[in-house]
Amino acid sequence: MSAERLASGDPAPMINDPAATEEPWVLPSTRKVGILSLILTESALFTIFVVAYVFYMGKSLNPPYPKDVLEFPWLGTIALLSSSFTIVAAEIMLRRSHRLGFLLCWGITIALGAYFVYFTAFEWLHLITVKNLTIDVNVFGTTFYSLVGLHLSHVFIGLLLLSIVWLLTFFGKIPADHHEHIEMISWYWHFVDVIWIVVVTVVYIISVRVGIN
């Protein structure tokens, strides 16, 4: 402690004072706050549609019924859920600055998502033309296409984002250190996958396997 500080009466700074070494508080990432807000909002929207489906379950007065026309979408489900693993692999490749590895894993994610869309479109075509299940045939048709269609629209949005990132990365328009942008899209894609688990459980297991009309 200096003589001048002793003379002035100023207290000496404590060497082990936590406040002296504490890092200043910074605002959270606006991107993370934004995507979390979006996920919460979309979760509320899906909750409304799921509750509506459950509420009207078994209230169709005329066929076709779920147990008569629906089959568990194994291939589509496996493809979509597998895409969560490939998008994580793409993030790992990006952190390692492995551009080709990122493009490969990101591209596989797009392909798996696109297959899910193809699978769902083929399922709907079969339901409409063969099983005569249309959106206005009964309450089941209305709630089925509304809930599954809402999820499908979110898959479309996710595929659009994934495709834009892939193209921009391929042409060198996205810097290799933009990890947070990629992470936010990955969060959205994981959200779409989790929602599908809820949808497939309610629509293809509860209303079909239990035998509810």
Image (cartoon, rainbow, N blue to C red):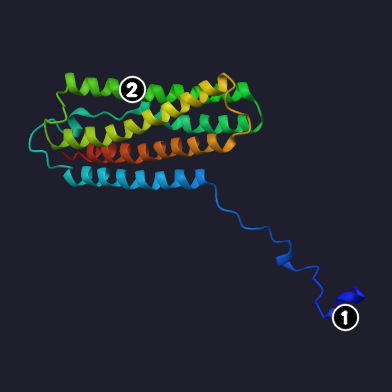
Q: Which residue is mark 2?
A: 119
x 40%, y 40%: residue: 194
Is the Cβ of the residue at disc 2 closer than 8 Å to that at disc 1?
A: no
Q: Is residue 130 visible?
A: no
Q: Residue furthest left?
A: 61
Q: Picture coordinates of residue 89 (x, y %)?
A: 57, 31
What is the distance, in whole Å, between disc 2 and disc 1 at their CAs? 83 Å
Tag 1: Cα neighbours inside 10 Å, few (<14), some, or many (≥20)?
few
User: Which element carries disc 2, helix, strand or loop?
Assistant: helix
Q: Earlier in the sequence, mark 2 or mark 1?
A: 1
Q: Quadrant of the N terminus?
A: bottom right
At 22% from the left and 20% from the top, the residue drawn is 126
Three-letter code, disc 2:
Phe
List x then y, in percent, for residue 38: 40, 44
Q: Amino acid at mark 1?
A: Ala
Classify residue 181 as left or right of residue 143: right
| Count of numbered tags | 2
Is residue 208 left or right of 105 when viewed as pictured? left
Residue drawn at 28 percent across, 20 percent down: 122
Quarter where residue 121 is shown = top left
Tell me what residue is drawn at x 16 percent, y 27 percent.
133
Query: Residue 12: percent from the left, percent from the top?
Result: 82, 74
Quarter occupied by the C terminus: top left
- Judge whether residue 196 can be spotted in this image: yes
Report x, y in % for residue 22: 69, 61
Crowd around label 2: few <14 · some 14–19 · many ≥20 (10 Å): some
Is 127 displayed left or right of 11 in the figure? left
User: Helix, strand or loop at disc 1?
Assistant: helix
Looking at the image, residue 3 lies above or below residue 31 = below
Depth order, front residue of 150/208: 150
Query: Among all residues in the image, which is located at the extreme right?
Result: 3
Disc 1: which residue: 7
